[in-house]
Amino acid sequence: MTTSPITLADRIAAAPADASSLATQEYFVNMGPQHPSTHGVLRLLVKLDGETVREVIPVVGYIHRGIEKMGEYLTYRKFIHLSDRLDYLSAITNNWVVCMAVEKAAGIETNDRIQTIRTLCAELQRIQSHQLWWGVFGMDLGAFTAFLYGFRDREMVTDIFEETTGARLTMNYIQPGGLMYDIHPDFVKGVKKFIEYFKPKLAEYEQLVSGNVIIQARLRGIGVMSSESAISLGTTGPVLRGSGVEYDLRKTEPYGVYSKVQFDVPVGRIGDCWDRYWVRMEEMRQSIRIIEQLIDNIPEGKHMMIKPTAKIKLPEGLSYSQAETARGILGVLIVSDGSDKPYRIHLRSPNFNNLWSVTAMGPGLRIADLVAILSSIDIVVPDIDR
Amino acid sequence: MTGEDLVSVIMSIEARAKPREKCAMPSAMIPVDALPGFMRSMRDDPRLSFDMLCTHTAVDWLGENRFELVYVLYSTKHRHYVTVSTSIPRDKPEASSVSSIWRIAEWQEREVYDLMGVLYSGHPDLRRMFLEDDWVGFPLRKDYKDTFMLGLPE
Amino acid sequence: MDHVPGGSFCVTSVDGIINWAHANSLWPLTFGTACCAIEVMMAAGASRHDLARFGAEVARPSPRQADLLVVAGTVVKRLAPRLRTLYEQMAEPRYVIATGSCAISGGPFMYNSYSTVRGADQIIPVDVYVPGCPPRPEAFLYGLLTLQKLIKEGESIRRPYVRRKPVLSVLPAGMTADQIRSELAALLTRDSTVDLSGEYVQNVQAGGSKQ
């Protein structure tokens, strides 16, 4: 017996707004796809009883560009520039995941210099992404100053990336076999200057937003998700770690040079919005710690191990690689038939899994809390729709 | 648990399981009617305890006239991965849903239905996810014809 | 009023004032779909590249209160009717800037995508195109200034809904396109990891290529 497919109208009709009670009447309200909390084009159908949310139905697909289908017509090197545009706030890590998959399957070796620079770029990208998250988080809760501060400091990291990779947002820097260009001579100096500048700023952020009594009241106890729920919903990244599960790919299956550096993994207690907020602030501190350990010891070597015009052919079979981006675990599943284009490439997107946790957290809260929850999950919608 | 131990434990649960060839990680290939019971024991068996479904997708083998459903599972307790795959015939692509075992499967399976056309029995809410409700065809299939798609000029 | 003695002077000055007011207080509608939203909308509005200097600070979420629609990001078939609705809800005079290559022509998703609309101008009429993937915030500011120039020079209350588009040169004064091409080729051969075969370089140095 198979289920026959239904449409969105059927789905809404299956959970009708209850018009029978005397006091209030439930109704559906449409948030999006164009709305001011610019997480992207996400549409939320919210069933409301007054101001209380009874059910949240996310509708996605407003930025579905068919990247998986396009990947079947592109070679692996060309696919990397598309992977930039998935979760564009951690573009370099997306590049790295695809390169890891290709290098593992094709047996391409890299050297220590390449891995160290890749790790440094990934951690800088993590700080940059969390700075943007912090700014937008403040803006969503009404604290617009946080947005300006976050972007002011984010511009420093963007400058470092622009000097080395040539681009501010979609870098296309990490290639199979190495890096597109060698790092700029001022890279080390720039990063050190940024670290020196940013450490007191992080304390300023805490003072500005974290200790604020309004922020605390809006975040504590809101959107609680238990760890079993979080695991069953497949969430990863700060959303999972906020719920108390210690799963960080950089510790459990280290890639790059993560096995050679010391850092802690922050884990929350009950899984409310405050825990997820705190986990990300701590992650920024740990990223600074990792960068400080690596920045003075970049080994010498080549920056690209294979010829840039070499044809990359993966052997037949299925391979899966993952890495920890700022939002969770991005995985790439490649099924190859021996040619230089993938037969099927599938991206395990962290934001796709994290989004559906809002259906578990939403009911029972108010719309303003829903905005806070969405912001604390930190989704980037083009990654959901690929 | 190492790869060989995993595979041997899996074979003890389901006798018809065999490793998927040409797969770099521990894998198991099972027939589709064993799917629901097998997946439940993958989660509940204390030696395995695969409590997280990392991803679920389908591969369209046009030449062999089958779809291959691929599930990548992870255990947060024992920290091991496995890839489970099963084949279903292309003209009658039906499988049973695992959404009662892992909640994220509800939406992963909706995505596979939307792009590949695999029908899942026991699914609470099977409808299109990324494309409009009235879209005709399943784009990720290899024989998908579309007048809108523009090919790269030679 | 033109046939009244001195009337055309009045109309022209009124034109000048109205166009100045329109151009210097554009209210953008927040319509960012993908990566360009971060660069064009958020980074351009933030502290370093300040959009408030040009009067475009008040970003209204509602189309009925906005007069500039900045299409930042890919337009997909599912979103296209919403974009059309938003455009039609805006009151005249309304302007559209298409930023990023996705909004101009489909961008990186032009080929082999079954759902990307190849350019926002398939859905709504566009006034200014800002290329880039994503364009720098400074490039978007240049696009905004181009739009302001277009408004100030191109509109008149004599012909209310007709816009005369001036042909703008995008090159800075004193530069030619050939100069840029040869400089670029020299830079590429000097420090690129991409192997340029000899014929491309010869073609460029000969001063023309098939494009």
Image (tube, rainbow, N blue to C red):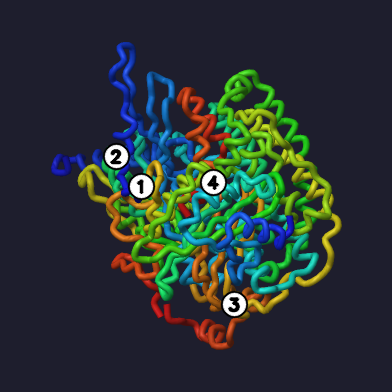
Please give the residue where the numbered disc 2 appears in the rendered image: A10
Which label belongs to residue B127?
1
Query: Which quadrant would residue A139 be assigned to in this image?
Result: top right
Q: Position of residue B54 (x, y in %)?
A: 58, 51
Horizontal arrangement in the rendering, residue A293 relative to residue A26 (left or right): right
Local SS, label 2: helix
User: Residue flagged by tag 1: what amino acid is it?
Assistant: Arg
Residues at badges 4 and 3 in contact (C-beta under 8 Å)? no
The residues bearing labels 1 and 2 have C-alpha atoms spaced at a distance of 9 Å
Q: Is residue C72 above or below residue A142?
A: below
Number of other residues with Cα within 10 Å of mark 3, as a class: few under 14, some 14 to 19, many 20 or more: some
Can you name the residue that lies furthest to the right here? A297
Q: Which mark is residue B45?
A: none
In percent of width and height, residue C85 lies at: 28, 43
**Which residue is drawn at the image coordinates 65% and 74% (left, top)?**
A106
Q: Earlier in the sequence, mark 4 or mark 3?
A: 3
**Badge 4 density bin: few <14, some 14–19, many ≥20, Cα 10 Å:** many
In this rendering, the count of numbered labels is 4
Which amino acid lies under the numbered mark 3 shown in the image of this protein?
Answer: Lys
Q: Are marks 4 and 3 on the same chain?
A: yes
Of all chains, the one bearing label 4 is: A
Between A80 and C103, the residue placed more toward the observer is: A80
Q: Residue at x 70, y 44 (%)?
A: B77
Asked whether residue A166 is in view, the answer is no
* Chain of the residue where label 1 is placed in the rendered structure: B
Answer with the quarter of the image where residue A266 lies.
top right
Which residue lies under the disc numbered 4? A351
Q: Position of residue B8 (x, y in %)?
A: 67, 60
